[in-house]
Image (cartoon, rainbow, N blue to C red):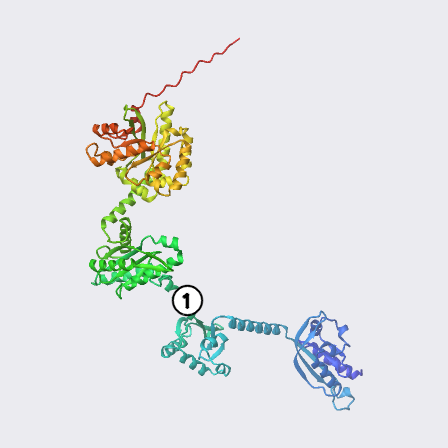
Amino acid sequence: MTRARATAVDAWAALIEALPQAAWVAELDTRALVAVNRPALALLGQPAEALLGQRADLLVATPEDMAYWDDAAAGRAERLLSDTVVCTASGRTVHVERSIVPMALPTAARGGAGSGRPTHCVVSLIDRSQQQQAEDAREELLAELQATLESTADGILVTDLAGRVRAFNRRFAQIWSVPDDLLDQRNDPAVHAWMRQSVLEPEAYERRLHAVQHATLLSTTERIALHGGQVLERVTRPLWVRGRPAGRVYSFRDLTERIAAEERIEELAVTDTLTGLPNRRQLADRVAAAAQRWRRDGPGFALLMVDLDRFRQINDSLGHEVGDRVLLEVAQRIQGCMRANDVLARVGGDQFAVLVHAADAGAAEATARRVLNVVAQTCSIDSAQFTLTCSIGVALCPQHGQNVDDLLRHAEAAVRAVKAGGRSSYRFHHNRVEADMRTHMRLDHAMRQALVSNRLRLHYQPQVRLSDGALVGAEALIRWRDPELGEVSPAQFIPVAEDTGFIVNIGEWVLAQAVRQAALWRESGREMPIAVNVSALQFQQAQFVDSVARALAVTDLPPRLLELELTESILVRDADEALQRLHALARLGVRLSIDDFGTGYSSLAYLKRFPIGKLKIDRSFVKGLPDDDSDVGIVSAILQMARALGMQVIAEGVETEPQRQFLQAAGCAEFQGFLFSPAIDAMSFERFLPPPRLPAPQRPHIRLVR
């Protein structure tokens, strides 16, 4: 290299050293680097000794650079400016903006001759890594946003403040059925015109859209109905750019299927799925509306509750599928005998209701009779023929109630009264029935509290042998004194207990208390058999025999001292199961008797099979003795039958001496009643018993002492 050329290179080296970006000087002929500045050393990660003399086309070896150096060698060196990449010593790829500027030696350096052909070039690099990262991140974000827009179920439309379309997703085009050519052409007026002509109310749509566009900060949610039957929800939000509103974002959601589903759900919520009739909820709404019309000086109306009698037998014998078909036929029959404006509803499994508009008692009764007649017509399904009946309860507005709850409750109470009275009829609501129900509820609650609070007690009525007047037993009878109700008769609370099922709890308590008392008397040396009444419901409990055995075991009372008085209904209700249970009790050793004999239904065949040892003649047959011929005949027949079956007989309710004498003469073994003593508490009863046995004196212990 000549001194002049070296001087020029030094000048260029000083020049590039002053540059802030990476730069080096390369000789065109040899492509060798002759000068490198410090930013280039830092960028490439190599020392100056390693870079000086290195080929420039190897530092930035892109196809573009290789072509440039080939052109330069051929004398076609020109300026080059473009983006490229450079690889550092550590292997990192750096995005740069590369510039190559050909440089010619000064005239003096060329010896005063030549054309000024470039001999060197200055290569400068501007690091664009951060800018490239930002651009990559922006492109990635845009891709994510576009993917998000396309994946959402909502149609998205973005406009500027003037309403020009800035962006949209394909779902928007699908919901509005916008032709592709309108979107591809970016024909904004045509897109808006298409949307306007698609709605059912274009004028209202346009006014609302105009108001939204002029209120740049407004956020709204509204529904739009389209000609095709679709219902869209449009949510409008302002688009913010750098803290200022720059447009609008509209999201459109197709609510058509959801609205149809909601309507179906609402329909199912108020409609019976089997018959398609209104259900209890819809009936309540209809009754409420009728009551409101009545309050506005409208006519009264009637509510009929129709309950099919013994419908369970159809399901049990023919199956539920046939039962459903029967319900459909019954619904059609009742519907066919109603007036056009009346309402039929299905409010339960086999229960219907009829709302009779503008009806008084006469119109309600006429409707009830028609329903009774059509339901009673012969049913024929799959060659099976049978007859249905129904029970109908009637409540009138305003006589029996002025709101939905009262009318429904009273009509249902009337149905229960019909059921209790024999079924297959109708009955109007009576306030007395409601009062009886409230009394029933109060008694039930107070009775349960009495058992918990130990307000129940037992009295014992002596049972006497007629032949010699000897005391042979005691019947345990429950008594109840309430702090608010006073002395409550068993005739009042026992039926309530049987109706609610609480008689089982009471029966268990009576059994335990009576057995305990008999055990106490026995411990004092005074054995006294105890008779305990057992209700049919208590007897039917699966654990009844076990509870009797447990009560005897706890007190160590001999089973022969316990007599269980059973009702006649036990013998005829599931006789085989009753027989097994009675034999299990007999194996325990307890005595069994039939209480109130003659008031129910007892088959001689049952009495012969069951291990019954005693019959109790009911007080209703004893009352007329000895003057009433029918009572005399019944009692004589019972005694004769008992002798034939080898059973003892005891008569209850004996209050007069003539009654006692007749029973003794007729061959009755025992009696109980006021003639001897009413039922009394345990302490008073003990006056009929012999004195307690004194404990045997203990012999003194003798101890020998040596």
* Up-down relation of residue 330 to residue 104 (above or below): above
Total marks placed: 1
Question: Looking at this view, is 332 or 384 the one in front?
Answer: 384
Residue drawn at 47 percent across, 76 percent down: 174
Residue 287: image location, x then y, percent: 28, 60
Point out the residue furthest to the top here: 706
Question: Looking at this view, is 607 or 581 the one in front?
Answer: 607
Which residue, given by chain and number where applicable, does mark 1 sit on? Answer: 261
* Up-down relation of residue 577 to residue 330 (above or below): above
- Element at badge 1? helix
Quarter placement of the N terminus: bottom right
Point out the residue furthest to the right here: 2
Q: Quadrant of residue 389?
A: bottom left
Point out the residue furthest to the left here: 627
Hey, what amino acid is under mark 1? Ala
Q: In the rendered image, is residue 211 in sight? A: yes
Question: Looking at this view, is 322 or 234 the one in front?
Answer: 322
Residue 211: image location, x then y, percent: 38, 76
* Up-down relation of residue 562 to residue 203 (above or below): above
Residue drawn at 39 percent across, 19 percent down: 695
Residue 510: image location, x then y, percent: 35, 35
* Up-down relation of residue 534 to residue 275 (above or below): above
Give the crowd class for mark 1: few <14, some 14-19, many >=20 residues within 10 Å.
Answer: few
Question: Looking at this view, is 350 or 285 the one in front?
Answer: 350
Residue 4: image location, x then y, percent: 78, 84
Q: In the rendered image, is residue 476 in sight? A: no
